[in-house]
């Protein structure tokens, strides 16, 4: 409803993980390059970790687009709350492998033969498991055993485990030390800096068709960074509702007080911003490694998980 007033062709801050809107920072580029390299060179196991809302799913979708363009066979398992039997059922179903038997041994034989056929045809096969921090230890062990499907020189199956930082903590435990030793590449996502947040907002607006006069003032973008703590998903939340509020008030550019009102509605103002909106330019990059920042980050994400889908009903 606000697209006309701001000269937009589409919604720039949708919550769906559209790879067109992937914002390439140095770390995102390193993560994507690492994932591509690990799969191309058949490393077997790769992990992708990062806090909620830092772009893992968008990154995975971009990786899937790249794999599909290379005619790779992919299975994307988004429901990580499964047992060992369901794991094999999901993988076989994703690859359209027919197996009448429910016996694990028979399923493994079918999968191994199918993988060998794909290998002989020069095809790459990739399994990506999202929200991998929820995987149980028995399932993680089954996943480890899948990497035993190999030739004398190369792994037949490439596995990417994507999850929150809890995945890293789980992989440190003695129960999964054999799996941990097989992880050849570890990729990560992280929050945006102040400059990256501004570039992120400008980039999404540009892709959505924005041109001409700014839509957000510089102080508004500083406020967005301060209250979002650089988490892209929370940046989207603040921008989306600020556009709605700005449309109601017929304001362009959107000023900081509108962002602050949205932050208040989502209780983000109850957390200490990483810098006052008017002085965000003085943020030191070391703040992202500070204990206070990490504590605020966890609290903000907890708030965000509980936030309503819209800020208010408008008559």
Image (cartoon, helix red, strand yellow):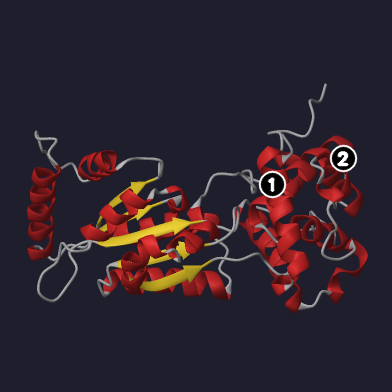
Q: Position of residue 10 (x, y in %)?
A: 61, 44
In-image side of 16 versus 99 (left or right): right
Q: Nearer the viewer, residue 182 or 24?
A: 182
Which residue occupies 24% across, 45% down? 91
Mark 2 surroundings within 10 Å by alpha-carbon count, few (fewer than 14), some (14 through 19), many (20 or more): some
Which residue occupies 30% across, 68% down? 39
Q: Nearer the viewer, residue 223 or 244?
A: 223
Classify the position of the C terminus by image quarter. Answer: top right
Would you say residue 229 is visible in this rendering? no
Q: Position of residue 268 (x, y in %)?
A: 81, 48
In-image side of 260 versus 209 (left or right): right
Which residue occupies 79% across, 56% down? 224
User: In the rendered image, which residue does mark 1 sit on?
Assistant: 302
Q: Which mark is residue 312?
A: none
In-image side of 68 versus 284 (left or right): left
Residue 89, by quadrant, is top left
Q: CA distance from mark 2 to mark 1?
A: 32 Å
Q: What element does badge 2 sit on?
A: loop
Which residue occupies 9% across, 60% down? 116
Q: Which mark is residue 250?
A: 2
Would you say residue 59 is visible in this rendering? yes
Residue 60, by quadrant, is bottom left
């Amino acid at each position: 409803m606000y697209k006309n007033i701001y000269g937009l062709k589409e919604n720039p801050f949708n919550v769906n993980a559209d790879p067109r809107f992937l914002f390439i920072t140095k770390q995102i580029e390193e993560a994507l390059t690492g994932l591509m390299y690990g799969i191309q060179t058949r490393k077997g196991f790769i992990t992708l970790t990062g806090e909620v809302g830092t772009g893992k799913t968008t990154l995975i979708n971009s990786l899937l687009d790249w794999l599909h363009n290379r005619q790779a066979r992919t299975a994307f398992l988004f429901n990580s709350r499964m047992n060992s039997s369901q794991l094999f059922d999901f993988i076989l179903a994703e690859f359209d492998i027919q197996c009448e038997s429910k016996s694990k041994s028979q399923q493994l034989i079918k999968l191994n033969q199918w993988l060998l056929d794909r290998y002989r045809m020069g095809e790459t096969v990739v399994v990506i498991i999202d929200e991998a921090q929820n995987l149980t230890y028995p399932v993680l062990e089954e996943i480890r055993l899948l990497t035993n499907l190999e030739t004398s020189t190369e792994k037949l199956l490439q596995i990417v485990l994507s999850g929150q930082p809890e995945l890293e903590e789980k992989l440190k435990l003695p129960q999964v030390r054999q799996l941990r030793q097989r992880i050849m590449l570890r990729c990560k996502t992280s929050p945006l800096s102040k400059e990256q947040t501004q570039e992120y907002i400008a980039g999404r607006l540009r892709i959505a068709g924005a041109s001409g006069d700014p839509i957000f003032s510089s102080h508004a973008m500083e406020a967005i960074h301060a209250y979002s703590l650089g988490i892209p998903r929370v940046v989207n939340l603040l921008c989306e509702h600020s556009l709605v509020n700005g449309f109601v008030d017929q304001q362009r550019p959107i000023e900081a007080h509108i962002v602050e009102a949205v932050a208040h509605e989502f209780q983000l103002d109850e957390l200490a911003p990483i810098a006052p909106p008017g002085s965000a330019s003085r943020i030191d990059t070391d703040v992202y490694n500070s204990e206070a920042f990490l504590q605020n980050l966890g609290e903000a994400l907890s708030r965000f998980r509980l936030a309503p889908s819209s800020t208010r009903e408008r008559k």
